[in-house]
């Protein structure tokens, strides 16, 4: 996959999908609607479909790609599910740690502030 980022915000956010064999019916219907001027030209044996993905979130993009290519979702294996669960637990622990460390940092700042105030009081008493 090649990604070409441009400063142009007016035109489409084009995704060109190349088919080694004939393109699906859905791909044929959408192919002429959008032009991707940055994509390389297809080989003589390839067909292409260009999708405009501007302002779409990843779920909408995936649904368009599935519709055009005929791709299907593959269910996660038990191993992948376990890994996702482990990552979620790590994320939750990370959030707890972040809160705990923020409290420690704040307590340290408060203690330093109190020490500075106490030193200031001592200086005032010395000057009297």
Image (cartoon, rainbow, N blue to C red):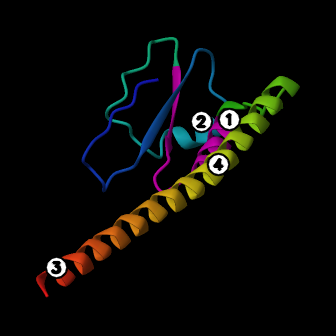
Q: Nearer the viewer, mark 3 or mark 1?
A: 3
- Mark 3 and mark 2 in contact? Answer it, CB < 8 Å: no
**Left or right side of 111 for 67:** right
Q: Nearer the viewer, residue 63 or 121?
A: 121
Q: CA distance from mark 1 to mark 2?
A: 5 Å
**What label sits on residue 59 in the rendered view?**
4
Q: Which residue is mark 1?
A: 25
Q: Position of residue 96 (x, y in %)?
A: 65, 53
For residue 125, which quarter of the picture? bottom left
Q: Which residue is mark 3?
A: 126
Q: CA distance from mark 3 to mark 2?
A: 88 Å
> At numbered mark 1, what does the secondary structure look like: helix, strand or loop?
helix
Question: Could you tell which of marks 3 and 2 lies nearer the N-terminus?
Answer: 2
119 relative to 97, above or below: below
Q: Nearer the viewer, residue 33 or 123?
A: 123
Q: Is residue 10 in view? A: yes
**What label sits on residue 3 in the rendered view?**
none
Q: Nearer the viewer, mark 3 or mark 2?
A: 3
Mark 4 neighbour class, 10 Å CA radius: few under 14, some 14 to 19, many 20 or more: few
Q: CA distance from mark 2 to mark 4?
A: 22 Å
Q: Which residues are magenta?
A: 47-68
Q: Which residue is mark 2?
A: 28
Q: Residue at the spot x=68%, y=35% of the render?
A: 25
Q: Residue at the spot x=52%, y=38% of the render?
A: 31
């Amino acid at each position: 996959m090649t990604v070409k980022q441009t400063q142009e915000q007016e035109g489409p956010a084009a995704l060109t999908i190349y088919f080694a064999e004939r393109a699906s019916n859905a791909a044929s219907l959408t192919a002429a609607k959008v032009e991707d001027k940055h994509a390389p030209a297809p080989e003589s044996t390839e067909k292409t479909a260009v999708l405009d993905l501007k302002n779409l979130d990843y779920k909408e993009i995936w649904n368009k790609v599935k519709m055009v290519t005929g791709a299907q979702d593959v269910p996660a294996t038990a191993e992948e599910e376990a890994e996702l669960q482990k990552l979620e637990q790590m994320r939750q622990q990370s959030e707890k740690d972040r809160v705990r460390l923020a409290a420690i940092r704040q307590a340290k700042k408060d203690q330093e502030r109190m020490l500075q105030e106490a030193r200031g009081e001592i200086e005032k008493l010395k000057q009297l």
